[in-house]
Amino acid sequence: MHDYDDKNYIVPDNPEFASSIHTISFFSGAGGLDIGAQLAGSPVISSLDFNKHAVETLKSNPYFKHTEHMHGDISEFNGLNFKQLIKRNNPEKLILIGGPPCQPFSKAGYWVTHDNRLGSDDPRNMVGNYLRMASELRPDGFLLENVESLAHPKNKHVIDEILESLDKLGYSTIVYKANAIDFGVPQKRKRIFIFASLKAITSAPTPTHGNKVDLFEQKLHAYERVIDWIGKFDKDELFEKEEVAVGKTYYHELTEVPPGKNYIALTAKEGYPNPKFVANKRFWSFLLKLHPELPSWTIAAQPGPWVGPFHWNNRRLRVPEIAAIQTFPENYRFAGSRREIQRQIGNAVPPLLGKAMVSHLMESV
């Protein structure tokens, strides 16, 4: 058994907030960005999601009992739906947060039409709907989170059109590529954040964690070890039937993979006697196993049968472990089936990454 320092945290049932900047959340999911906003000191006064289980998750947590949780499709909402809510809360400043799902976009541009009107008749165009809400609510600033592939050169037109739209609305913007491990999350997870503010944004978020080479020079903390977040959950009373790999197709091979490695450890490339696999012929995460002293790899929303990361004890990860690797509070509750909960957690922005991003937005408005 490895030694560990428990890094898990809890959130209060009756939170108090230091900031007069209030947040409205769209595409809220399980609330990763929403928790981040509140950890940064900004109360989330409203959330909206299309998935009923995600809305139930938010409603089941007292940390959000002051929040008006809405269930529905953003395309059926407009600024007027929030008029009374904003009036009632009377924030000094208002920010929006959200990670709209990004469908493949055409070069024609879904959301910038000839009359410069934001929005689109295409129901898949969630980014356009998010920008439409920004144009109607006119917040002081907002955050748009998306998958790393949005920054791929083939998607350059998508980013360009978003930035062009925001420029027309009078917002200053920056595009920031974030990796969760740089902000105290025990997991490598890359995401794109677009920051928008009515004031000029002059800087990007500053990482707080780094590798050993950077620590002294840049005054950073060391990257988080996954064992410090999940060590406490490795006990028999937290057993889940879904974690069992014994007796299944590749269980023997899983036991032969060293912690921190994947199936390539069992190939000729790695000098394995009687190789079981050929390197680069499988998904990189096939038989991928956590190393207790290192950060985790990305937690998937819908992992395949032998897709990792697996626990170093040759089993699948438990719900409290995947939640902790994502830095959800230890006392946070999730609604829905086991599969649904994995999906919610895997799709979320890690709350500690959310905290760093929303903090930077708050400083920029």
Image (tube, rainbow, N blue to C red):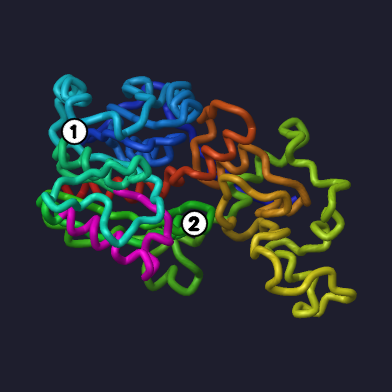
Q: Where residue 364 sits in the image (x, y, percent)?
A: 18, 51
Question: Residue at horizontal 76%, vertical 70%?
Answer: 265
Q: Earlier in the sequence, mark 1 or mark 2?
A: 1
Range of magenta residues: 144-166
Q: Residue at x 68, y 44 (%)?
A: 317
The residue at which mark 2 appears reads as 189
Query: In the image, what residue type sits under mark 2?
Result: Arg
Left or right, residue 100 beside residue 203: right
Residue receiving disc 1: 20
Q: Is residue 80 left or right of residue 268?
A: left
Q: Which percent across, then down, holds residue 237?
A: 75, 30
Magenta stretch mostly in which secondary structure? helix
How many dots with numbers?
Answer: 2
Was residue 195 drawn as part of the magenta stretch in this picture? no
Q: Nearer the viewer, mark 1 or mark 2?
A: 2
- Taking depth in this image into account, of 110 and 331 the one nearest to the observer is 110
Q: Nearest the camera: 254 or 219?
A: 254
Secondary structure under badge 1?
Answer: loop
Q: 10 Å neighbourhood of mark 2: few (<14), some, or many (≥20)?
A: many
Which residue lies at the image location 18% right of the left edge and 30% below the top edge?
79
The one of 121 and 257 positioned closer to us in this rendering: 121
